[in-house]
Amino acid sequence: MSSAARSSQATRSSAPSLADPLVHQVLAGLAQHRIVTTSQLRRMLRPGGTRQLMSRVLNRLRSDGFVGCTVLPEVNRTRTNAWYLTPDGARLTRDLPILRGRPPYPITSNMAASLKTPHTLAVVRTHLAFAEDARRLQHEHGPWDWTPEVSHAIGEGERIVADAVMYYTVAEGEHRRKLRAFVEVDRSTMSSERLAVKLIEYARLFQYEAQPVGRRRQAPAGPAWLRWYPVFPRVLFVLTGASRARLENRMSDLQAMVAQHPLVATLAREVRLGAAVLEDLEQHGPAEAVWVPLTGGNHRSWTDL
């Protein structure tokens, strides 16, 4: 028997009980969101449950070799674990229907996890702000309505990778409004100019038309993004990691890109663009007037950009 076959057989023989839905949800949550803390998983999957319940499931999965964890720097002397799938855990989740065909994302070492953890956890914080707001407002947005690291071609062999694509349904009585957004989470680790260049990439995606492959050149069927979205998603920038004044300067630079770059200006005429501070989303909720429209104007809700 080959080593790969032995590994697959060992994975099947030691797999967690299929009768435990929380185990499946934890594995799927880690496959979907990459790296998540114990507290974030509880808020995401069992908001009314206890931390001890989530810890028991995670520790069992770790003892079976399906998840690993990295310890975050101590805050107030509290040990915080950030969890991720191991290659064996990724094999378990490969065929879970809830992942909609997205490949699992195993992490092969503690070092690899620690390098990705700060940004990934900021993206999860952003998702939780929307999810908890949706629960409060009785809208629809759950763990599987947030897809991290979505890549699209923009021409000339280049691609744009959104930090996440969000699917959100506003439910107001019998009226339902389905919204989508590309979400960019900025921890102020790159220059303000590099952040603003993201808007050019989204403008290129908005205009990009894939050419058919073959001898006979046919007329393109329209923008390539129509293969995935009925309308072009909003573009939301979520900023953190710096003083309020510095974050406001970064928002101003985003607004300047909209005003000065012709491709981005064309995008802004058709697509809603906004920016907000992550801590404001967590404190007040994304539905409050905490968003700066990149085309100018007063703060408003992200649904009203």
Image: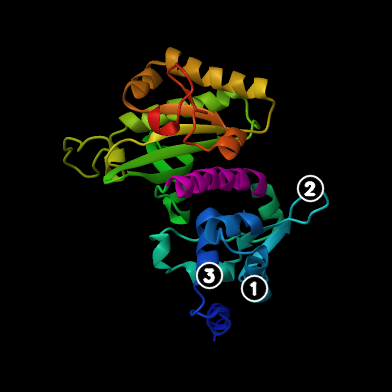
Q: CA distance from mark 2 to mark 1?
A: 27 Å
Is residue 148 visible in the rendered structure shown here? no
Is residue 100 visible in the rendered structure shown here? yes
Task: Estimate the x, y position of residue 135 in percent, counting from the top left.
Answer: 47, 50
Span colored in magenta: 117-137
- The residue under the point 56% across, 69% down is 89
Q: Secondary structure at mark 2?
A: loop
Asked if disc 2 and disc 1 are in contact, CB closer than 8 Å, the reply is no
Q: In the drawing, does residue 153 fall left or right of residue 255? A: left
N-terminal label among 1 and 3: 3
| Residue 75 - label | 2
Answer with the quarter of the image where residue 50 lies. Answer: bottom right
Task: Estimate the x, y position of residue 277 in percent, counting from the top left.
Answer: 58, 31
Q: Amino acid at mark 2?
A: Val
Q: Which secondary structure class fits the magenta region best?
A: helix
| Residue 65 - label | 1
In the picture as drawn, the residue positioned furthest to the top comes out as: 260
Magenta stretch contains residue 49: no
Q: Quick check: 45 above or below 62?
A: above
| Residue 270 - label | none
Pair 1/3: label in front = 3
Answer with the quarter of the image where residue 249 lies. Answer: top right
Specify few, some or many for label 2: CA neighbours under 10 Å numbering under 14, 14-19, or 20 or more.
Answer: few
Task: Estimate the x, y position of residue 152 in percent, counting from the top left.
Answer: 39, 41
- The residue under the point 49% across, 44% down is 133
Residue position marked by numbered label 3 in the rendering:
22
